[in-house]
């Protein structure tokens, strides 16, 4: 009798989260804010990518901000704040994902109407975050060349729910003996037709393509 009860409670929690996320998404879209949810395993380089993204947006005059999820510490928030963007840390204290109400509480005092882009750096995890809608318009699944080509096959739910896949640390591909063709085939097998952007935050590779993608997605949202 325990398992059905656990399933019932989880279903109710997810339903409540999804209802809030839908309302948040509608409000974000009304205000013209593109919300981007970045999901990956720890060490994939999403903080490095986000830091460089925010830096370039600030320099270009694109109003952007970010919230960062981690189990503990505000290290990533302090690092991202060096970009000049507004950043706030969410510490989950052991929870393996962010939920919509956490994001809502932490941005409640922000002037969202002054933003064009809001990034959510989710907790480093490839399982739990895939089930939780945060009100985003774009979900990004990141895959590092250091992780291997079969990550999409091992964690299909995340990549199947993503709008775009970003391959990070592409400058290390040769050193890691990364099989690019296999990685692309695996992504296509899980999510046929998914957009794939190859990047290196350290070298600046693919950043223009990434920023152009974000600009296009915001324009699409506004139309």
Image (cartoon, rainbow, N blue to C red):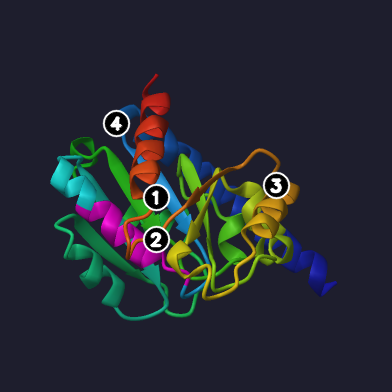
Q: Which of marks 4 and 2 is in front?
A: 2
Q: Is residue 137 visible?
A: yes
Crowding around mark 1 (Cα neighbors within 10 Å: few <14, some 14 to 19, many 20+) is some
Q: Position of residue 191 (x, y in %)?
A: 69, 45
Q: Position of residue 83 (x, y in %)?
A: 18, 59
Toward which corner of the image does residue 183 lie, by quadrant? Answer: bottom right
Q: Nearer the viewer, mark 3 or mark 4?
A: 3
Residue shown at 47% from the left, 62% from the top: 170
Q: Are marks 4 and 1 in contact (CB under 8 Å)?
A: no
Q: Do the residues labelled 3 and 4 touch (CB within 8 Å)?
A: no
C-alpha separation, residue under disc 1 versus residue under disc 3: 20 Å
Decide which of 36, 9 is in the foreground and name it: 36
Vertical position of residue 216 compared to residue 106: above or below:
above
C-alpha separation, residue under disc 2 versus residue under disc 3: 21 Å
Dot 4: what SS?
helix
Dot 3: what SS?
helix
| Residue picked out by circle 2 | 200
User: Which numbered disc covers residue 31?
Assistant: 4
C-alpha separation, residue under disc 2 versus residue under disc 1: 7 Å
Toward which corner of the image does residue 73 lie, by quadrant? Answer: bottom left
Earlier-in-chain disc, 2 versus 1: 2
Q: Are marks 4 and 2 in contact (CB under 8 Å)?
A: no
Q: Nearer the viewer, mark 1 or mark 3?
A: 1
Q: Confirm whether the magenta stretch covers residue 53.
A: yes
Q: Are marks 2 and 1 in contact (CB under 8 Å)?
A: yes
Magenta stretch, overall SS: helix
User: Which numbered disc covers residue 206?
Assistant: 1
Q: Confirm whether the magenta stretch covers residue 133.
A: no
Dot 1: what SS?
loop
User: Which numbered disc covers residue 188?
Assistant: 3
**Left-right relation of 23 to 182:** left
């Amino acid at each position: 009798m325990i398992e059905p009860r656990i399933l019932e409670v989880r279903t109710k929690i997810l339903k409540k989260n999804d209802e809030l996320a839908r309302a948040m998404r509608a409000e974000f879209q009304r205000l013209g804010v593109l919300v981007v949810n970045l999901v990956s395993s720890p060490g994939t380089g999403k903080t490095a990518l986000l830091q460089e993204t925010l830096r370039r947006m600030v320099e270009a005059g694109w109003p952007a901000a970010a919230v960062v999820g981690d189990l503990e510490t505000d290290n990533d928030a302090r690092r991202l704040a060096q970009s000049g963007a507004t950043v706030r840390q969410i510490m989950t204290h052991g929870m393996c994902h962010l939920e919509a109400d956490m994001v809502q509480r932490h941005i409640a005092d922000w002037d969202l109407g002054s933003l064009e882009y809001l990034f959510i750096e989710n907790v480093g995890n490839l399982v739990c975050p895939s089930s939780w809608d945060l009100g985003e318009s774009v979900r990004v699944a990141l895959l590092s060349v250091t992780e291997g080509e079969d990550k999409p096959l091992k964690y299909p739910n995340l990549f199947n729910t993503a709008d775009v896949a970003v391959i990070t640390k592409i400058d290390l591909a040769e050193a890691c003996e990364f099989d690019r063709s296999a990685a692309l085939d695996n992504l296509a097998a899980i999510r046929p037709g998914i957009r794939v952007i190859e990047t290196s935050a350290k070298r600046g590779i693919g950043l223009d393509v990434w920023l152009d993608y974000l600009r296009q997605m915001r324009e699409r949202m506004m139309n």
